[in-house]
Amino acid sequence: MPLVLTNSLTKKKETFTPIDPLRVKMYVCGPTVYNYVHIGNARVFVFYDVLERYLKFLGYQVERVMNFTDVDDKIINKAKEENTDSLSISERYISAFLEDMVALRVNPPKVAPKVTDHIQEIISLIQGLIANQAAYIASDGEVFFSVRNFKDYGKLSGKNIDDLISGARVQTDEKKRDPLDFSLWKPQKNSLEPAWDSPWGKGRPGWHIECSAMSMKYLGETFDIHGGGMDLIHPHHENEIAQSEAYSHKPFARYWLHSNMLTFNAEKMSKSLGNIMLTRDFIKKYSGEVLRYFLLSGHYRSTIDYSEQHIREVQSALHRFYTALSKAEIASKMPGANTSSFNPEEDKVAEFGKTFDAKWKEAMDEDLNTAKVIGLVFEYVRLLNAYIDKRGFKPTNNTSEICQRFVNSFNSLAQVLNIFGESPQDFLNQLKLSILVERKIDAKEIEEKIKSRTEARARKDFATSDQIRNELLSQGIELRDLPTGTDWDILFKNS
Ligand SMILES: [Zn+2]
């Protein structure tokens, strides 16, 4: 089955066919570097990382370009607040962003251009637009894009230009011919603002023009995929199309992909509402695996709601998955024995396992339905657990094959989602520790209680032994008596 993607430009699901059959060129709008990225921002970058991984899995080479907006009012204001210059602000948050992406296991883009390194390209693009009468110069040197002169304006957002103009606030800027016209080049207001020489005087580029200039420089005038978060559709992406096509007279990006928002307890995550969860704080508290899983647990075009409860469900699901993977790894090495033992779950898991790889690929081909892939994973885990945990489980001749297939499937799925690929022991140990911190339980205390219980059992004091077991159980800690001694694990309410 071919890969199908929802194209925001045509509002349709379309079969994906790149211009070059071997190579996919894509551009993603990167961060404005004036603060740390929150988990809603991270969703876009994880989505594009998975898209790139899947395209590579399908055999394409991928050229992904992601810009850094390092000139902007927000950066200038932050620099003023901190009594420093824009450059030190942008450098600080570029390195913070790169650190966060490493922790999120997002592959770095092939090129990550900065606006301040591309002023010449931006100036020539604006000159081209003026020459094409798509832009005009106001008396103070500000250059505006003339929205009315671009007949296709609104084709991405589906907004009608006359509705937009009548809906726009009363025009306060007399320099503009139309209230919708947007700035391509802003004259320097004071000497503290970063500025470059241009044919229109000292100034700096507006926000939208940078993405047109940098995407066309690295990917050509027409390329395959462009995207970002849904909040960028209008005006940012609409304006990018207008600038680029008014300049080149060619179609700009062929497929526009947009990932949806993350809500916070059903509200929009925003700085003004004070409900921001920073990527770095989340990863420190939970882990990169938990965040990626959470962000991929919904389809990219649907909103996902962040809540403590949702994260507990993610932890519980990953606990269930890695426990199953650990069992499968051990059981895959078991010698085949006892062929006479009958376990009716064996056929079910064997059958599901044989079609699992084809099923998850099919779900990815259906507009990258990671939510469906995760559903399939847990169906597989349920069948494997039913097989292994069956009372009186004895390995059969098929056990090692069934379990090895389970392990192998996740080796390949992990390449695409970049989750489900950790060592089960490492993941489960780290998860245990982070949950103990959350529940304010000391690991040493658990070990001491286990020791007292072992001693009680040795002197056949079963009342004390049961009391200790129940005490721990009430804290969500379950004891497991194994031939090698007593082990403990976290108990999740819903697992
Ligand atoms: Zn952009």
Image (cartoon, grey):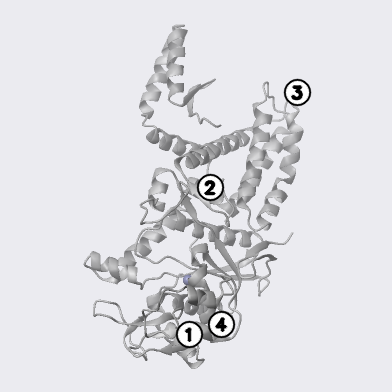
Crowdedness near tag 4: few (<14), some (14–19) or many (≥20) residues, C-alpha within 10 Å: many
Q: On the image, which quarter does residue 193 sit in?
A: bottom left
User: Residue 341 shows which numbered tag?
Assistant: 3
Q: Nearer the viewer, mark 1 or mark 2?
A: 1
Q: On the image, which quarter does residue 354 sit in?
A: top right
Considering the numbered disc 1 on the image, is that residue within a helix, a strand or a loop?
A: loop
Q: Between marks 3 and 1, how big is the CA–CA gap?
A: 78 Å
- Under mark 4, the amino acid is Glu
Q: Judge whether residue 198 can be spotted in this image.
A: yes
Q: Nearer the viewer, mark 3 or mark 2?
A: 2
Q: Earlier in the sequence, mark 3 or mark 2?
A: 2
Which residue does the numbered mark 2 point to in the structure image?
293
* Mark 1 Cβ inside 8 Å of ligand 1: no
Q: Between marks 1 and 4, how big is the CA–CA gap?
A: 13 Å
User: Residue 245 shows which numbered tag?
Assistant: 4
Above or below — where is 205 with respect to 401?
below
Considering the numbered disc 4 on the image, is that residue within a helix, a strand or a loop?
A: helix
Q: Nearer the viewer, mark 1 or mark 4?
A: 1
* Mark 2 Cβ inside 8 Å of ligand 1: no
- Under mark 3, the amino acid is Ser
Residue at the top extreme, as displayed: 460
Which residue does the numbered mark 1 point to in the structure image?
146
State the image coordinates of residue 152 (x, y, percent, origin top left). Answer: 58, 80
Q: Earlier in the sequence, mark 1 or mark 4?
A: 1
